[in-house]
Image (spheres, rainbow, N blue to C red):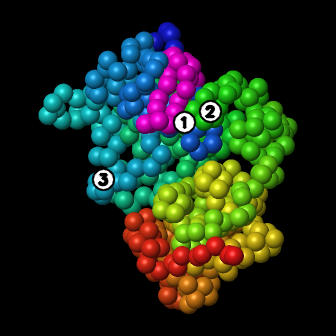
Amino acid sequence: MSFAGPTIECRGVTVRYGTRSALAEVEFLARPGEFVALAGPNGSGKTTLLRTILGFVSPEDGAVAVLGHPVDELSVRERARRIAWVPQEEVARDDVPLLSYVLYGRYAHLGPLEPESPADRAAAVRALGEVGLGDRLTDGILSLSGGERQRAVLARALVQDAPILLLDEPTAHLDIGHQLDLLERVRALARRTGVTVVAALHDLNLAARFADRIVVLSRGRKVAEGPPSDVLSSELLERVWGIVAELRREPRSGVPYLVPFRPTSMPPPAIPPLGPGPVHVVGGGGTAGPVLRALVDAGCRVTAGVLNLLDTDQETARELGVPTTVEAPFAPLSAEARAANGEMLRAARLVVVAAFPVAASNLGNLEDLQGLAGRIPVLLLPRGAAADWDYAGGEGSRALERLRSEGAIEVEGVPDVLRACARLVPVVSPTP
């Protein structure tokens, strides 16, 4: 499907959730063959903008058109023929063969009860080859690693044969190698086929490396837009993200990148005096966000383990005013960071360990918990196979096994954490 004008057009889009403004008068265009990155802190409106383009969210004011048609006038099938969608995370519940899983993307092109044709199957095989999974056709979707599964979701989107591809944090929970591989494939797709790609990306440096244009959102408003070389600046990072950084350029390509150093202001050091806790949450890569929000909403006093600058969980902690220790991205945890984290651990009444990816750089977050389970409750949220999260040569798995042997408790999810907090953690009264 070819189209001469903008493939996506948002005019004055305003979205509210109750009394909260999620998007405010956002203007946005995307054109054929363009890779546009949406950037901004947590809560800036990136996901809401994508869901509005999809027609999942109706704007209070303004309008959205895809390929020249108002999105709210299109049926679900018509939207699926125009827009392919890769969510941030999708849980596969049935271990269907990979080829069958990818063929789900052809349903928008089939009539009621119409079976897939040989051409549909050929398209699915071709898409799996394009994402590097051409030799896994009969493997169950649940047998894939996290990075492979995200590529399978991309293959399913590709066989929709839609002129627009939307991705919501497609690199979340992937190691750096899989991040680069996935975005390189997406950019090549846009160049080769003319598909319009719009991706919400948390990492500004990845956005600068792969996107033609970056749109920066802050508190629901568009605050910057243009090519990466025009948009990225130390001033922008400080103004929007609250981070002090230095702008540099790759010598060969000239692509700009930012080297963050520290937050401009740390979260309030004083922990509120009332409420149970403190509860110390260990996470990273977005895995601790739901726990942090639930505990804060429940009135608990909360601290967080060492987190990297610009990490999703670090931004969530900053937004919620949760004290944490901040380390430079991809750097090993320094002695100073581990010492500051140790002070929080000594004050904790309960520790929650999220299912964060473990690498050599953040292994210390698990090592510093050794010996705690005999003194205070330590809760472990569920993890998948070690291949999906242990990038520390097995050291992460061994550290978790030591915690289990010391008495750490396996829990199913956030509701169990809240129940444990209410049952096990004392309320701390104000100091006179």
User: Residue at 63% of width from left, 69% of height from top?
Assistant: 273
Name which quarter of the figure residue 267 lies in: bottom right
Identify residue type, mark 2: Leu
Residue 126 visible (yes or no) = no
Identify residue type, mark 1: Lys
Residue 97: mark in rendering: 3
Taking the magenta stretch, the answer to whether it contains residue 148 is no
Disc 2 target residue: 217
Q: Are marks 1 and 2 in contact (CB under 8 Å)?
A: yes
User: Residue at 53% of width from left, 30% of height from top?
Assistant: 23
Say which element carries label 3: loop
Quadrant where the N terminus is found in the figure: top left
User: Residue at 26% of width from left, 34% of height from top?
Assistant: 107
199 left or right, relative to 82 = right
List x then y, in percent, for residue 191.
57, 26
Name which quarter of the figure residue 160 lies in: top left
In this rendered view, identify the residue nearer to me: 314 or 384: 314
Disc 1 target residue: 46
Q: Nearer the viewer, mark 3 or mark 2?
A: 2
- Disc 2 residue crowd, few under 14, some 14–19, many 20+, Cα 10 Å: many
Q: CA distance from mark 1 to mark 3?
A: 33 Å
Dot 3 or dot 2: first in sequence order is 3
Q: CA distance from mark 3 to mark 2?
A: 39 Å
List x then y, in percent, for residue 124.
35, 38
List x then y, in percent, for residue 232.
75, 33
